[in-house]
Amino acid sequence: MSSPAALPSEGLPGLDPRFSRLVAVPGRGADEGMTRTWHILDTGPELARLGVSPRGTVLAVHGNPTWSYLWRSIVARSFAAAEAGEPAWRVVAVDQLDMGFSERTDVVRPLAQRVADLAALTDTLGLTGPVVTLGHDWGGVISLGWAVDHPELLAGVALLNTAVHHPEGVPIPAPLRLAGARGVLAASTVQTTAFLDTTLALASPALTPEVKAAFRAPYGTAERRRAIGGFVADIPVDARHESFAELQRIADGVSRLTVPALMLWGPRDPIFSDRYLDDLVERMPQADVHRFEGAGHLIAEDRDYAAAVLTWLAEPHDEEPPAEGTEAAWTPLWERLDARRTDDATAVIEMGAAGVVRRVSWRQLDDRVRTLAAGLTALGVRRGDRVSLLVPPGPTLTAIIYACLRIGAVVVVADAGLGLKGLTRAVRGAWPDVVIGELPGLTAARVLGWPGLRISVPTLPAVTARALGIRHSLADVTRVGAAADLPPGPGPDDPAAILFTSGSTGPAKGVAYTHRQLSALRDILAAHFDVSPGTGLVTGFAPFALLGPALGTLSVTPDMDVSAPRTLTASAVAAAVRASQARIVFLSPAAILNVVASADALTADDRAALAGVATFLSTGAPISEALLTAAARVMPNATAHTPYGMTECLLVTDITLDGIRAATEAPDAGVCVGSPIGANRIRISALDSDGRATGDPAETPGVLGEILVSARHLKDHYDRLWLTDREASRQTPDDDARWHRTGDVGHLDEGGRLWVEGRVPHVLVTADGPLAPVGPEQQVERVDGVRRAAVVGVGPHGLRQAVAVIETTPAAAGPGLAAPELAARIRAATDTPLVAVLAVPALPTDIRHNSKIDRTRLSGWAERVLSGERPTAP
């Protein structure tokens, strides 16, 4: 039953009635010879009234079961920008025929018809280029169909969760299977509002009743909901479906698009998962991609997509490649492994439980790397494929990593220290092509639906392998590789690795490195710490253990649980040193705590071995002078270093224990992390009165601000986090170097040393201005009875008050107010006014390092406790 188009009623939240209009359009295809009336939101007429000439048009197409109301934010924001004199874009947001407030036609509209419908509308509107399409859900497919058919007008494509291809043999998403099932389709999509209600329930946070009512407004009766069922029925589940050929045509055409592209994605989408994002990225590798963690299918309601799209539209997209010869010569990461391929000396040692020691020679390691590399290639792993590794540190992991690097596969390293939830988020975010793992990791991959072709390190029984979806074992890879050739190696600027951050300040981010950047990291480590073939390296920190072969030196991982660094003991470190005669020891801050705590168990032989260590390093979090001194007593002849860095740039500055002791005489607040290493550079972007880092980056001493770093080994980008990348490079020096905003706050002193004072989100904006937490924390930690402290804020922004939350010695029995006498001594020790002193048995820290205090979590906890809630563990 047909019905005419209409204008929406006024008063729908966020929808300006000025932009609603009806357009009569000569029909095509099934509508040939007829005229159909569309409802659209169109800012064009109002822009004309302002006398503004737009740069181009954004053609926005909704999916099922929404309507143009989905695009109200970009309609309003783009017009407001034009009114403010900013670059203007016309936005045309359509209600597809039979949807929203457009005409109900009583005509079946498969995909090809809907693409033709949209072309008829744009011809009637007389759209001229440049046009940027914007689509969501099934509207994404239709908008891409228009894009493929109008290359002469197309300037770019922008997409929110959608798909143009479904893998053969993989069931369509469960919600769509259920909605499209025989006997369910009409009941769930047309006769009732179940499908519409379920879609609206996917928004996070929940939509207000008024916004839900606005989305429901065009669909008040079964007749007006017929197209909702029609869209579900039009999903081509296989090649027999009427719309399959058109979908394939669009998918093939998308792969040939070379225009700029933007993809904004909600990973918590039960319909369009990251599988479909990965396919789109493969078809349009030029795309800027941002995954909004926590967002779902209705990403337009979950996140500020409009600001992202308008920002993207305002940026130039014709960047020239860097001039040849601007980078230093490149030596592959495996060059020293190649050089020692006939050497029978030990390359890697694995320290197992009960004193079991496994030694692998350089010859064996090189043979293993070459065989695995050839085998992976023979099994279909190609340059650029992502390989996720769920293997603990040791010779096997080392060989797999170097094999992947040799063939140009991209190593994805998200270690178990992220926890199961964080690891799942990381693996799904990276969407690997291959997963290589031990049994626990592969079991988790199966249960949690991680992507990728699965290869097991051990050879498992056939029944187990089938149950876990394992296609090959490492033995299979080796067998195939023995008879296969190595492919050509990657280039210096090809992607090499994606390393995930600790997740201590939000969801873990994938940090992408090229081969050139990893090699630069090797070179700065070797030069600064004088690493030679005879040095030897003992490390409880996996990234540096894996650099051993690249440095041409023996590497050994002590017996420990790598997912919990604080399980490392002094005896285990001594055993590793004794087995390797290594002269450098590298440990995380959490590992040092337990090494120092367990030092009493060292034997005379253990102490003799540790006395041979020449250099001791710890990075990942600031180390106090007292803790570093205690560690130095365990390794009495070692020069103790604590470099400053992060996953994005692993070595930035360095300071020795003697340097830390000298810094204690300085008046500066924070942790002194020393001077930049080699050619590395530091700048500070000053905080304004609102606590934002807005100052021009400079080297002015004594200025509190965000720390910016530049180095040859600085990461290339964040994986699929375009907006995060933009923020990290915001307002950086214009000197042709790559710079990174670290998110840390601190200052430079008169001697050029860097002092770290916390994280930007942890700065307290008080009535007297910004206050960084580390300085006051250090003052509190000097009080007897305080083991560790965090200073956090309570109260409104701009009027924050400081609260000290402490761990005591001995540990507090439970959370609550600190003892009055201790609280008085703490207040007397700091020049920061404290409204409360709270004691907890243990401060919350990140999973990986067990040392980075979660001040954001503590701040919320302190607010609740001081408002009268019963104290519980933070």
Image (cartoon, rainbow, N blue to C red):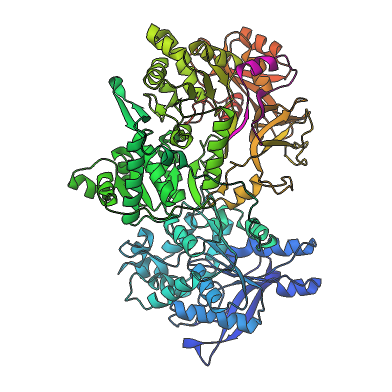
> In the picture, residue 315 is in which quadrant?
bottom right
Residue 666, image x, y percentages: 74, 17
Left or right: 598 as drawn, with respect to 74? left
* 15 or 266: nearer the viewer: 266
* 519 or 763: nearer the viewer: 519
Q: Is residue 607 above or below residue 412?
A: above
What is the span of residues highlighted in magenta in the rendered image? Answer: 651-679
Q: Is residue 287 visible?
A: yes
Examine the structure image and report whether residue 655 is included in the region drawn in magenta. yes
Q: Is residue 448 visible?
A: no
Residue 703, image x, y percentages: 77, 31
Examine the structure image and report whether residue 70 is included in the region drawn in magenta. no
> In the picture, residue 601 is in which quadrant?
top left
Task: Name the residue: 64% across, 20% down.
Answer: 777
Task: Name the residue: 57% across, 9% down.
Answer: 785
Task: Name the residue: 48% across, 46% down.
Answer: 497
Q: Is residue 793 above or below residue 191?
A: above
Residue 630, image x, y percentages: 53, 12
* 167 or 833: nearer the viewer: 167
* 635 or 337: nearer the viewer: 337
Q: As drawn, which residue projects farthest toward the front? A: 342
Q: How many marks?
A: 0
Q: As drawn, which residue projects farthest toward the bottom? A: 33
Q: Is residue 735 above or below residue 638?
A: below
Left or right: 2 as drawn, with respect to 48? left
Residue 82, image x, y percentages: 76, 64
